[in-house]
Amino acid sequence: MNMISTVFTRPWTVRSASVFRYLDEQYADAFFTDGSLRIPTFQRFRNNPDEEIGDPYEGRVAASISAPNANWQVMAMNGQRAYVLSTSTIESRELHGRFVTNFGIRIQNSIAFANAISSHLPGFLGGMEGLCSYHDKPHATVHTSRGLDFERLLNETKESEVDVGEKIDRYVAEHVRDLLFIKRAQYAHQSEYRFIWYCNGYETNEQYIDIKCPEARRFCEKVDLK
């Protein structure tokens, strides 16, 4: 999926998706009581044994980057500290059954919700949200017009090899972050809409963060599909 920025000279309306977070009733009630919410990390998804929720490939990307002066083959894992909230564009008893719950939170304004949550995450740097794409073989090709000047980097005597390596890592990361929204086709029935909040620091064994964000409640409503 491409990131597109555009300017219209005539009226245009984009319908923002209403998305759903499946939760046990006690956790849905806790959110609407005081804004309590648990947000997992990629590490948590990789370690979760539940076949519906867990995915050993979460936070990993496989891609080819085609640039003017180089072609890259990338097999990488997200290294930035990040918190990930999975929601769905589907509300149904069948999907509720897969998540073993009849309750959840309907997020009616995803951008306002994401902004409210961000103010409660320590070291928040920026984030992304959007629909996931599903492929049998989740390998992508990324085309970019912005190359990396290797000769300049290597000839800059003021920079150490570590500095050069970090710049290359950042260049690659910038071009593959969108691929964190690509999942294997076996999960397509979830129709996932994903939020990712990036924070200062590196990914550790942290499984989740618990926050209280009461201001996010006004963008949501509780749903019972019993």
Image (tube, rainbow, N blue to C red):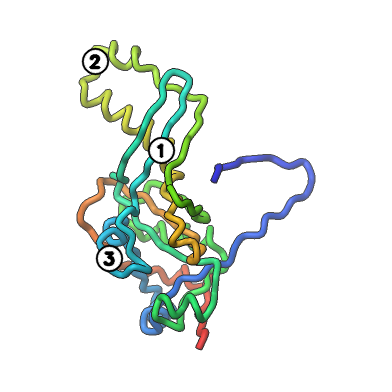
The amino acid type found where label 3 is placed reads Asn
The amino acid type found where label 1 is placed reads Ala
Residues at marks 3 and 1, CA–CA distance in whole angstroms: 25 Å
**Label 1: how many Cα within 10 Å (few below 14, some 14–19, many 20+):** some
Residue at mark 1: 63
Earlier along the polypeptide chain: callout 3 or callout 2? 3
Residue at mark 2: 158
Q: Secondary structure at mark 3?
A: loop
Give the numbered dot on residue 48.
Answer: 3
Pick the residue in front: 163 or 146: 146
Earlier along the polypeptide chain: callout 2 or callout 1? 1
Q: Residue at x 44, y 22 (%)?
A: 147
Pick the residue in front: 61 or 175: 61
Q: Residue furthest front?
A: 136
- Residue contact at pointers 3 and 2, CB within 8 angstroms: no
Pick the residue in front: 57 or 163: 57
At which x and y percent is residue 123?
A: 31, 50
Q: Residue at x 42, y 55 (%)?
A: 184
At which x and y percent is residue 43?
A: 27, 57
Q: On the picture, is 42 further left or further right than 110?
A: left
The amino acid type found where label 2 is placed reads Lys
Q: How many marks?
A: 3
Q: Residue at x 32, y 28 (%)?
A: 167
Q: Residue at x 69, y 40 (%)?
A: 7
At which x and y percent is residue 191?
A: 51, 63
Q: Secondary structure at mark 1?
A: strand
